[in-house]
Image (cartoon, rainbow, N blue to C red):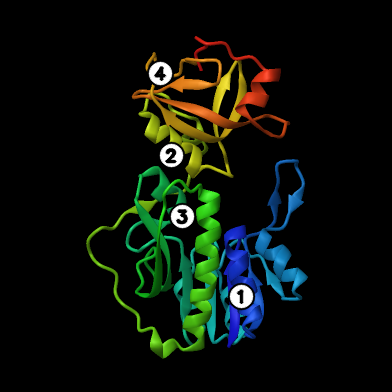
Amino acid sequence: MRIVFMGTPEFAVPVLEALVAAGHDVVAAYSQPPRRGNRGKIAPSPVQARAEALGIAVRTPVSLRNDEAQAEFAAWGADVAVVAAYGLILPGPVLAAPRLGCLNVHGSLLPRWRGAAPIQRAILAGDAETGVGIMQMEAGLDTGPVLAEWRTPIGSQTAGQLGDALSSVGAQLMVKVLADPAAYPPAPQPDAGITYAAKIDKAETQLDFQRPAIDVERQVRAFNPAPGAFFELAGERFRVLEAEVIDGEAFPGTVIDDRLAIACGDRAIRVTLVQRAGRGVMTARDFLRGFQIPTGTRL
């Protein structure tokens, strides 16, 4: 098929690569504009970088709501637009331009977690399972019918691990749907069980030790690898990339032993992987050799 691809983060890259590997004619890739990274340099999105390496024309409009952008999109003459974590609203003329419309790779079991951050929200909520689906896009936010889906337990996976799995499977699902669209009739989403996965606010990434330890551990997994959960001590931030729930009791936020166990609203967590600003990721044991956090310290 003649395809316009639309995506921005690393999650979308395997989908783009699978379309190319399957022999489709990806005539253009749309991505959000390059942005300033952690070190102050303007950098293209992962999708833009990969598309350019594959020799695919790239467009990075700030919006698709103006007539000029919509006319350019329609001019590609696409059979279908494949969307994966693009990050911009698609107006009606864009949704209607491709012959088969716009198909989205969505990282949740719809209608559970419609919206921007379904993987993180599923972990934070303690969902037992999640999945990925291929959805026919329409004007509403992730309201369209589902053509195919795949389910998986969440277990102890981080957002990064879960995202990699959902992206890989979603890419293969999309290839299967495009190979035989008639075999995947769209099914309307149920009216019950609708929730919305709001975009992650950076304030949410500070560990809240007033909450039960099980919730704090979910924060750690939901924000690994990015933007990273953290605690503060003496005005400095320390990223926590891995932790486990243990027994323990004290005022929430109190360090209760010499191995970086921290009391929570119920039980405690033990930090096992940590990162100090400007340093590499370390085990808690190695970290504490060079930076002492005595028992009784309040975080």
Disc number lying in front (3 or 2): 2
The residue drawn where x is 75% and y is 42% is 40
Dot placed on the residue nearer the N-terminal end, 3 or 1 = 1
Cα separation between marks 4 and 1 = 47 Å
Task: Determine whether, in the image, residue 205 is placed left or right of residue 26.
Answer: left
Between 169 and 27, the one nearer to me in the picture: 169
Cα separation between marks 2 and 1 = 31 Å
| Three-letter amino acid code of the residue under disc 2 | Arg
SS label for mark 4? loop
Disc number lying in front (3 or 4): 4
Cα separation between marks 3 and 4 = 31 Å
Q: Which label is found at residue 218?
A: 2
Cα separation between marks 3 and 2 = 18 Å
The residue that mark 3 highlights is 116
Does residue 299 show up? yes
| Three-letter amino acid code of the residue under disc 3 | Ala
Between 193 and 180, the one nearer to me in the picture: 180
| Residue at the limit of the structure toward the left, as seen here | 192
The residue that mark 1 highlights is 18
The residue drawn where x is 55% and y is 68% is 64
The residue drawn where x is 71% and y is 19% is 290
